[in-house]
């Protein structure tokens, strides 16, 4: 994560979850993250309403030039990527996997002006069927000179990667002792190959213990 605000939010989210895969909405104290609240938001799990904003920070609303509360999260993305974002939010909410991603926005009525943003999406534990399920931020990498005067149009998603405690449960390959074929030996020849320490002849092969298994 490049944005200090996103690093702070991730550290706070990670501390509040403890040994769980994700914290609950009630575990997040707004006063503890007041310095980044303006860039933060909560999303509802209401898929029928396309994951509406439950809360949206003042700087985030100013970026788009409107109040985002109760508006769909999909509406801040270009049409071609709304399905991708819908699936991404589903993964965050259901699989409890976080996402950090780049986003690019063009200024309304002026395609020559761009703003680069970094987005962070973090899962929250489910309590009610429509409870807030995603905590996030959308932060400009640098505050543009037109901020507060001009507004951003629909965003385009850039590079992204998954983060979070749920990834720690994915098994990784382990080293184990198993036979590994090293070379062929002709046992009928008087000048057969000399064995290195630890090698054994098995069925015409020199075999050394070692190797990898998953």
Image (cartoon, rainbow, N blue to C red):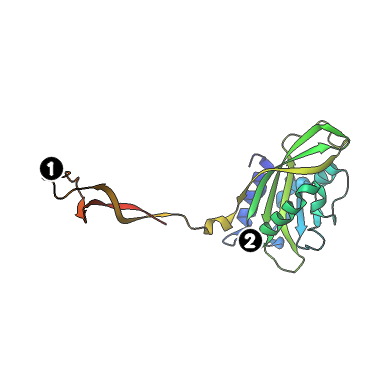
x then y, percent, for residue 21: 60, 61
Q: Which mark is residue 191?
A: 1
Decide: few, some or many residues near mark 1? Use Cα within 10 Å; few <14, some 14-19, many ≥20: few
According to the picture, the residue beneath numbered tag 2 turns out to be: 95
Q: Residue 20 carries which label?
A: none
Give 49 or 135, whichever is nearer the viewer. 49
Labels 1 and 2: the sequence-earlier one: 2
Q: Could you tell me which quadrant the C terminus lies in?
A: bottom left
Q: How far apart are marks 1 and 2 (CA)?
A: 61 Å
User: Residue at image x 64%, y 39%?
Assistant: 2
Q: Residue at x 19, y 53 (%)?
A: 201
Q: Which of 77 and 207 is in front in this view?
A: 207
Q: Picture quarter containing residue 18?
A: bottom right
* Left or right, residue 202 beside residue 22: left
**Whole-percent x, y for residue 130 in the image:** 77, 66
Residue extending furthest toward the left: 190
- Eye-nearest disc, 1 or 2: 1
**Residue drawn at point x = 76 percent, y = 57 percent:** 43
On-image quarter of the N terminus:
top right
Name the foreground residue: 18 vs 151: 151
């Amino acid at each position: 994560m490049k944005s200090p605000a996103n690093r702070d939010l991730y550290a706070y989210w990670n501390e509040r979850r403890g040994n769980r895969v994700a914290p609950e909405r009630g575990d997040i104290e707004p006063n503890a993250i007041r310095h980044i609240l303006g860039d933060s938001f909560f999303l509802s799990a209401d898929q029928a309403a396309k994951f509406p904003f439950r809360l949206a920070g003042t700087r985030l609303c100013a970026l788009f030039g409107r109040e985002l509360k109760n508006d769909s999260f999909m509406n801040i993305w270009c049409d071609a990527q709304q399905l991708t974002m819908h699936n991404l939010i589903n993964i965050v909410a259901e699989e409890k996997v976080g996402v950090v991603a780049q986003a690019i926005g063009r200024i309304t009525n002026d395609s020559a002006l761009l703003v680069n943003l970094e987005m962070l999406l973090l899962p929250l534990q489910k309590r009610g069927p429509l409870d807030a399920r995603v905590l996030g931020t959308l932060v400009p990498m640098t505050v543009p000179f037109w901020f507060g005067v001009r507004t951003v149009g629909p965003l385009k998603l850039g590079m992204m990667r998954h983060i979070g405690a749920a990834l720690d449960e994915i098994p990784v390959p382990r080293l184990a002792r198993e036979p590994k074929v090293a070379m062929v030996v002709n046992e009928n020849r008087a000048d057969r190959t000399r064995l290195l320490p630890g090698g054994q002849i098995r069925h015409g092969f020199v075999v050394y213990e070692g190797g990898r298994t998953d």
